[in-house]
Amino acid sequence: MTVEAAAGHGAALAADARGVLAPSRSTARLMHGSDLLAAMIAASLPWSTSLPAIFVGLWLLVLVPTIDWRDYASCLKQPAFALPFALLGLALAGMLWSDAAWADRLHAIKPVAKLVIIPPLLYHFQRSERGTCIFAAFLVSCALLAVFSWIVLLHPAWKIAATASAGVPVKNYIDQSQEFTLCAFALVLPALTFWRERRLAAACACLALVLLFVTNMLFVASARTALLCMGVLLALFAWRHLGRRAAMLLLAGTVAASLLAWTTSSYLRQRITDIVVEYQHGHEDISHASTAQRLIYWRKAIAALAQAPLLGHGTGSVKRQFERAAEGHTGIEAEVVNNPHNQTLNIAMQWGLFGVVLLYAMWLVHLLLFTGDGLAAWIGLVVVVQNMTSSLLNSHLFDFHAGWIYVLGVGVAGGMTLRDERRRTAAPHR
């Protein structure tokens, strides 16, 4: 490369850095405020439902003046940016052919609407240098919650909210398990990296936090969906980051740890054996029928899909379809719900196979954001795979807590990976 060409390329790279990767001087303070509010969203999410919503609104207000709308419009051509808007557009259109009450139609828009926060997050964090701070805020908040969880297990009066489960200070055991699973597996890559670099103190600190989260789920409170996610994410980690020998050692260690947990944790044994009890006796006792309920929900949801396979029954129609399916039945068969506890079926009942295609297209496109190396790519991959796995047994993309974890995780980690990719593309060839 000639001196002139190198100088020209360097000038182009600097211009790109000024226009895309770094904020201008006039917006630097607003950019910093956006980062701070994003960290506050992450830190408040494990503890509250109202605070994250407030911080999201404030974040949007601070972010909007920093947006280069021409650049943002060009970003919307990318599937990772566009597909959340496509899902929302389908939900809005689905109100036209739904026979549900208008209150149900409008209520069903809210779970989809939060997905359109992903594009501005992607846009902002491909310019910001503080994405790691957002994950750190979430990790510290979850670590404090894990410690507090042990405390309220021993002193239930210290609970912040009147939760139904022992050892759950706020919200519920499902949300708590989702958080702890994400944090535990986000930390395994840094632990491995520090170990390989002989930074033993840092590796041990990461492993201590992993043990804090995992032991809480094994001995205090856990959702069985989270246990399924742990198995999937463990296999993903071995496939992505370990050789064959290390993977076999991990498998042996996991089996040994599982046997130890099974023999020492009566809570874990009860959670697993309850699956059989719930399936066998769910029809007689609806209060202990989680497994049987899900199977019935899925059967009725598939029957509803068969009646309107292409475009479904419209936005907000889930409850109406279960009401029709309950007619003439008693007991558990007569139960009316507005959630089939499966993300695919939830979307299929409302928007048919067209909606399912959009859902899986969005998941796939977001997965492809995180095929590279590095911590941001690993965290983003864990977020998407966890959501896909847990959505087999729940409608977690539409649930408040798990849905916002997906939005925040994909938005921040995706923005960081896009920023790194843009830098690699703009870097001078050597």
Image: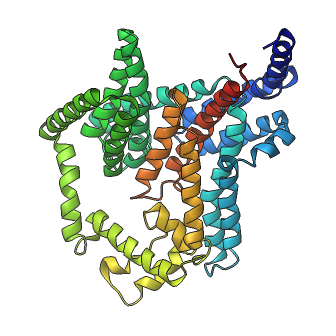
Q: Position of residue 314 (x, y in %)?
A: 61, 75
Residue at the (80%, 42%) spot, across then down: 72
Q: Nearer the viewer, residue 388 or 406?
A: 388
Q: Is residue 201 above or below residue 49?
A: above
On the rendered structure, is 139 left or right of 221? Answer: right
Q: Is residue 174 above or below residue 239?
A: below
On the rendered structure, is 90 left or right of 326? Answer: right
Q: Position of residue 185 (x, y in %)?
A: 40, 33
Q: Nearer the viewer, residue 413 or 12?
A: 12
Based on the displayed image, in which of its 4 quarters is residue 291 positioned? bottom left
Which color scheme does this rendered protein use? Answer: rainbow
Give the farthest residue toward the left: 263
Q: Position of residue 159 (x, y in %)?
A: 39, 39
Based on the displayed image, in which of its 4 quarters is residue 212 positioned? top left
Residue at the (16%, 43%) spot, across then down: 266
Give the farthest residue toward the bottom: 328
Residue 49 can be seen, yes or no: no
On the rendered structure, is 65 left or right of 349? Answer: right
Residue at the (19%, 62%) spot, across then down: 276
Counting every numbered tag in the picture gives 0
Based on the displayed image, in which of its 4 quarters is residue 93 positioned? bottom right
Q: Quadrant of the N terminus?
A: top right
Q: Quadrant of the C terminus?
A: top right
On the rendered structure, is 405 left or right of 428? Answer: left
Q: Is residue 9 above or below residue 410?
A: above
Give the farthest residue toward the front: 2
Q: Position of residue 364 (x, y in %)?
A: 54, 51
Residue 258 can be seen, yes or no: yes
Q: Nearer the viewer, residue 304 or 111?
A: 304
